[in-house]
Image (spheres, rainbow, N blue to C red):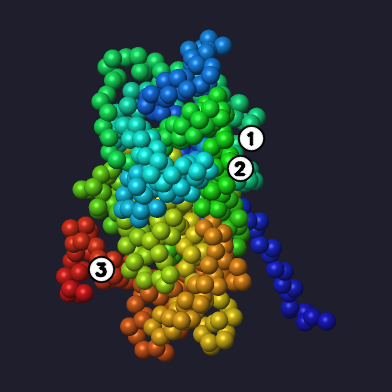
Amino acid sequence: MFAEDSEEVIEEEPAEWRLYTSIWGPRCEWCDGRDFFDNEEVVFERFASDWQLALRLGLVKLITENDDGGVGDTDGDGIPDEVEDVSALLFQYNQLWSTAYLAYADAVYGAGDDLDTGMKENEGWKAFTEDIKVWSSINLSVKDASQKNNLIFMSIDKWDKPTQSAIAAQTPTRSKKIVRDVMAKPMPPMPRVIDEEASHEYAHMLDSVSKAALDAMKEPANQLNNKKDLQLSRVEFVVALIKTAIERFVKTKQINDVSDSVLKLLSEHIAPAIHERAPPPDAFRVAVCYTPEMSRALEKHAPALRVIFGGLSLIAFMLSKTHPPKLPKPKESKKLKRDDGSWIKVHGLLSLSFWRQFLVGLNLFGCEIRERTLCFVYSIMCVADSNCEEGRIREKHLPFEGFLEALVHLATVVPLPTDAMLKERDAVHAGALMHTLQASDEDTLKEMAKEQACEWGDVPGHSDSMARRVEYLVDIMVRKIKMLGTLHPEALDTDLTPLTRREFRTWALREMGVQDTLLPETWTHEKCAVGEV
């Protein structure tokens, strides 16, 4: 029996986990889709914006001159039937071709520094056509295939970014703010191909988009000179796909209908080649990021992650003063009440260049530049209109929640210790073990990298859970930033004190190679105080 003064201890059950009230919560208020996913509504808004521009590139003439139906317009709405069919088909397969563009654009394929740089001819475009086997399937010689690619590329490459933005401003855009019921259970990842029924529901809206673009083209004041820039934007890329389908199937008299030729190109050539190379971002979010275990792992380390992101976003803001678009100045983190919970809203935006510099400074083993870039670009949410200033900022930068997703991606591409390894080597902390391995046992690191390798968008097998991998990654990052590697080896495996802003600044000044002109005034004074490092 219990003593009279004893009380039975009743443990409270943990609150039910909800995505909306988790560390990911603020994402649904920041992104254009007002959601945690690239839902069909925001995808449609982006496609509508792109489609208007595509029509201004002369797409109506390209389609009607090569289709057996010509300029036929059975419903009398002023838009040729085949143009309507092609637009509906491209929207249905939007995720497929847009992720294909992402995989072969210069930032990913060519390790370029600027996300504004599109797909180049002799790198991205050539590699894309080779990978989808569009010409090799008809035994076209290398020389003839190269000539085909060159002619298509040059005929489509018509606008630079300023011209594209000017044309976009001439045509009414939709780019509305979409509000979803974010309190509901998360929707499953959007399928690779939007189902036909959903596609038809958007058809009438696409018609109005097409009509607006065609009406704008009739105005003489809206005519602009072509300005080639030797790269394909996302809009030019989709026009190039149509041109390729026509050259490959219509002009060889295999297919008479342009939309049928585009469908064959998408379903039989692009889909098989792109399926593994460019999986849909939402699939990873559902399976890996938006889980109770991952959310709690990130929340556990949130104070340190906020310090890191705050420092990086401040540097990005300083750079934007002289390199537009200018970013909003980061504010202090703020606690916000939402529904029956609360969020900590972390302000600021991170650019690709400083994400890369951050990872270079960390010197993580096995972190190649392509993977660094994929981690970043795959964490960007769909932007409704990338031609307006706000849209350009959102399509090139990550907020705090995007930074978290990029870190989760990073944990899939770098070798990390496992629980078993820590026990075997009598280590307590992952950062300490990795420091030892990088200093004296590269063979083990190479073996780890080989065992944990996986396709992009997948997770390493034969390892701990992804939540544990992320915790170990953060431990490695924070120990490097706190510069424990300069201490006596016995001190490396001790428990950490909270990461401070000053510690991050000191590390950034040493390891990131940021120019003095980009540093906030307080950082500059601090650098002078500690001397050149």
Q: Are marks 2 and 1 in contact (CB under 8 Å)?
A: yes
The circle drawn on residue 195 is 1
Q: Which residue is mark 3?
A: 509
Counting residues from the N terminus, which is met first, the one under dot 3 or under dot 1?
1
Q: Which residue is mark 2?
A: 191
Please tell me how crowded label 1 is: few (under 14), some (14-19), or many (20+) other residues with Cα within 10 Å. Answer: few
Counting residues from the N terminus, which is met first, the one under dot 3 or under dot 2?
2
Residue drawn at point x = 38 percent, y = 44 percent? 143
Residue drawn at point x = 35 percent, y = 28 percent? 168
Q: Is residue 386 above or below residue 185?
A: above
Q: Is residue 408 above or below residue 260?
A: below
- Badge 1 element: loop
Please tell me how crowded label 2 is: few (under 14), some (14-19), or many (20+) other residues with Cα within 10 Å. Answer: some
Residue type for callout 1: Asp
Q: CA distance from mark 3 to mark 1?
A: 51 Å
Residue drawn at point x = 49 percent, y = 34 percent? 248
- Badge 3 element: helix
**Most foreground residue, 175 or 46:** 46
Q: CA distance from mark 2 to mark 1?
A: 8 Å
